[in-house]
Image (tube, coloured by chain):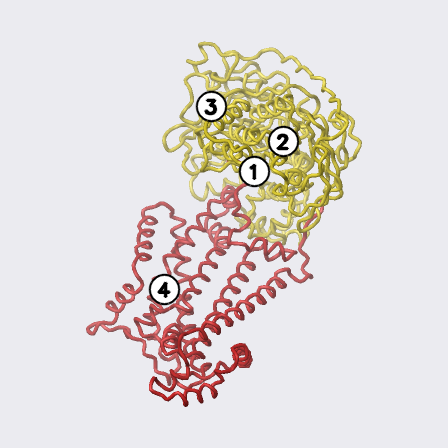
Chain colours: A red, B yellow
Amino acid sequence: MPEPCATSHRLPAWLPWFIGRLGYGLLTAWVISLVVFIATQALPSDPARVILGPDAPLESIQTLREQLGLNRPILLQYLSWLGQVLHGDLGISLDSNQPVAGIILARFGNTLALLGGVLLVVVPLALSIGVSLALRRDSRLDRWALSALIFLKATPGFLLAIGLVLLFSMPQFSLLPAVSILDPDKHLWQQLEFLLLPILALSLSSLPYLARLVRASMIEALESDYVSAARLRGVPEWRIVWRHTLPNALVPAVQGVALTLRTLIGGALLAEVIFSYPGIGTQLNTAIQMRDLPLIQGVVLVITLGVVAINLLADLLTVLLTPRLRTARRVTLIQRNRRGIQSWWRRPAAKAP
Amino acid sequence: MNAHALMASSPATPAPTGFAPSVGAGVAGEALRVENLRVELASGADIIDHIHFSLAPGEILGLVGESGSGKTTLATALLAHARRGAQIAGGRIDIAGASLLELKGDALRRARGGLIGYVAQDPAMALNPALRIGNLLRETLLAHEPLLARAAQADRLQQTLVDVGLPGDREFLRRFPHQLSGGQQQRVMLALAFVLRPRLIVLDEPTTALDVGTQAHILQTLRRLCKEQGVAAVYVSHDLAVIKDLVDRVMVMYAGRIVEVAQRERLFARPAHPYTLGLLAAIPDVARQRPLQAIAGHAPAPGQRPQGCAFAPRCARRSAACTSLEPSLNALDSAQQVACLHPQLTAVAAPTVVPATMLSCADTPLLSLRDLNLSYDRQVLFDLSLDLYKGECLAVVGESGSGKTSLARTLAGLGDTAQAELTFDGQPLSLLARQRPAATRHRIQYIFQNPYRALNPRQTVAQCLQAPLEHFFGLKGAACRARIDAALARVALPPDAAHKYPHHLSGGERQRVAIARALVCEPSVLICDEVTSALDVSVQAAILALLKQLQGEGMTLLFVTHDLGVVRAIADRVVVVREGRIVEQGPAQDVLDHPQAAYTQGLLAHSPRLG
């Protein structure tokens, strides 16, 4: 019998696959930068007029347009912008006259800290809730917990956030600051208390989805043939949960976490508005209101790159967590399996029921 | 062979002779003793009931029945396990002196695996895709013998791997299940069971997913291990032919009851229960061509068992007493017990051997394929040419991965990347169905392997048959209805089946609907892709008879299969495909009786046979 065999000396097939994906990701980011650039040009507003105000005389506006290079052909404008971006220069904000890169860096750092906090809270919580509910499937606890999760999911995020404020930051019982007005002179790590409520609010609103996802994939894994075979072999229950089931249930969870992060990275508006948290979402909002074109372009570019990076990481983790993909010898095998989250062992059984 | 027969009515007679029960067996040299076992659904309906039997160390029992007979339920009940929604409601299981159903918690966990091993049906599903083979084996060993020293552990693993015929090197132990072939995966399952040195091994159709050659090797290994180590085995199968060379005794189940237990030779020579007779008559035999007889009707579902003998409604020998009295298992003699009021007591006459009709091949082929090359990731078909003559049944035979299904799909117009010259009825024909003219497209139809997945669950049978009629012939209303009724009648389905959804139909009925769907297109060629491999043997016999009858009415059949018995039953000519190339072709009789290619000889040698 000719045997497929994984030789350890060869380069794993997922490496070229990953490099290909990286290339596609960068291509996506480039296309989006193009779209954003064209879209901002189509906005019915003139940056020069925005800067000089509605009462400025036409000549000064013309002069400023020339200074800003706005009367050059659009292609030239795009190319020079792209060239600057590649050198790390995102331009100067029209509104504040600060370098865009600096503004975004601070704001994006805040958003990343928020996301990191949410990740630290939600992933362990969703895993433990999902696993323990799956193990007690259809019990009273499971039914009540599911109802509670659905209730939580149905509650609008801002209600949750306001509820948290009412709980933790009333005048007579003030544990945590209700508003996250960060001191720009201090490092974020020195004012972590401002992060707690936003993290809690975002975690609560994304917990139901992830916990139910983990529960569902755990149940599916627990019902698989390999788990019943392990049970009938006398493998202890704790090993079945931690060694046999969880590794297989993690893959859908990874994709779920990536989905949550993707929505949060640009749109953690819930926390940013209610807690006045200085994240990148409100920054984009103000930039659009001010018609601050360089800032809009910069923010969108950074968010796009963030989403691309999250997708890449999630896909890489999926491949590394799935032995069949990790040890694949041909790139095509990975590509075929990566279409959708449907894993090869979740295909319907070949034999009829 | 040991002759021991156990039942409710007669006292136990321990094995007097046989395989030295030297291993420290339990009471009276028995490895397993089951008494009055009952498994029921939550509703209280019994899935299996009144199960009594026992096994001596080293004895292999074949447990045979069709789907729904309760054989898998019984197999898992032997490990004190019932599927979701069912529970073991009563009875007693003694394994090597321990009463299994009274064990709880950790004691039960230790008994599973330690006393009783289990080998599941599909090794690809039963091996965890995330764990390495070595880790699985070590984990299993440590779960039961945590005090074993590291060296002794390694020794035991090596010994077991050698026993089941696997390489024991480090590289192999580091592999994941998907890096093994199907046969190796099943050997790993055997190793996982035998590494603990159990007293009993339960095997649930462990070879159905494997090719005949691999199956024969696995069965050989299993028999050797059981005899060497004195391990008793219960081998569950739906196919009597498969277990013929493996088991010592056969137990036939029907509708949750044991209907017959007999020594192997006795059962095949003188089956006493009409159901066993029916099963034997339905199995196609590689060795000789004979008319296959299906068993009419269905097995009753749990809770719908008729009063009296459950088989009576399908039985040709039934009398008035059969419908009122449920027969218990009685001994005919020391080698055979049967639960029937009118058992067959004499040997069955040898079946009439039908001389195969030699088709006078028309001079020009109806369908002619030249130089077919097909690749997906790699090339699967190489310069393959074949001719299909009008009115014949051509069987395409090969193991899994030989490219036989790709060949069939290409002829049907589904092979996207194929390159070949195809002529149909003297005219060149496109390899893509959508580029074929409608006037010829309807003349080549395809029937899929799995009837459970080939029918749209949201369409009734009538809707399913109506679509091609509207598409090809623009028929609507009454004209359409008449054609549908005619097609259903042709596949022997009642007219009221038209309003049913697929989930209301049994597997055999679904496959008939799939055939009817092809027939309404008025095809001249039917391409059948393993159309019976998902069906029970008795249903398979009926479907094969139907296809044979269609052929008699002038249909041309291309029948793809891995089962040489089916080839013997239905084919006029055979094409043997191996790794994308034809290794042998010719009239079915010549190829099956005097195979020329070594590959065909091997296939034939490994094919299970009744004779």
| Image quarter of residue B15 | top right
Nearer to us: label 1 or label 2: 2
Q: Which residue is denoted by mark 3 in the rendering?
A: B495
| Residue B390 in picture, x, y percent from top left | 70, 27
Q: Residue at x 31, y 51 (%)?
A: A147
Which of B253/A38 is in front? Answer: A38
The CA span between labels 3 and 2 is 23 Å
The CA span between labels 3 and 1 is 37 Å
The CA span between labels 4 and 1 is 44 Å
Q: Earlier in the sequence, mark 3 or mark 2?
A: 3
The CA span between labels 4 and 3 is 59 Å
Question: SS at mark 3?
Answer: helix
Q: Please tell me the numbered disc located at residue A203.
A: 4
Judging from the image, mark 3 belongs to the subunit labelled: B
Instruction: Work out which residue is located at the far right of the displayed protein and give it.
Output: B596
In the displayed structure, would residue A124 be above or below residue A67?
above
| Residue A159 in picture, x, y percent from top left | 27, 63
Residue type for callout 3: Pro
In the displayed structure, would residue A145 be above or below residue B367?
below
Q: Bin the neighbour count of mark 3 within 10 Å (Cα to Cα): few under 14, some 14-19, many 20 and up.
A: some
Is there one chain holding both mark 2 and mark 4?
no
Q: Bin the neighbour count of mark 2 within 10 Å (Cα to Cα): few under 14, some 14-19, many 20 and up.
A: many
Judging from the image, mark 1 belongs to the subunit labelled: B
Is there one chain holding both mark 4 and mark 1?
no
Discs 1, 2 touching: Cβ within 8 Å: no
Q: Please tell me the numbered disc located at residue B121.
A: 1
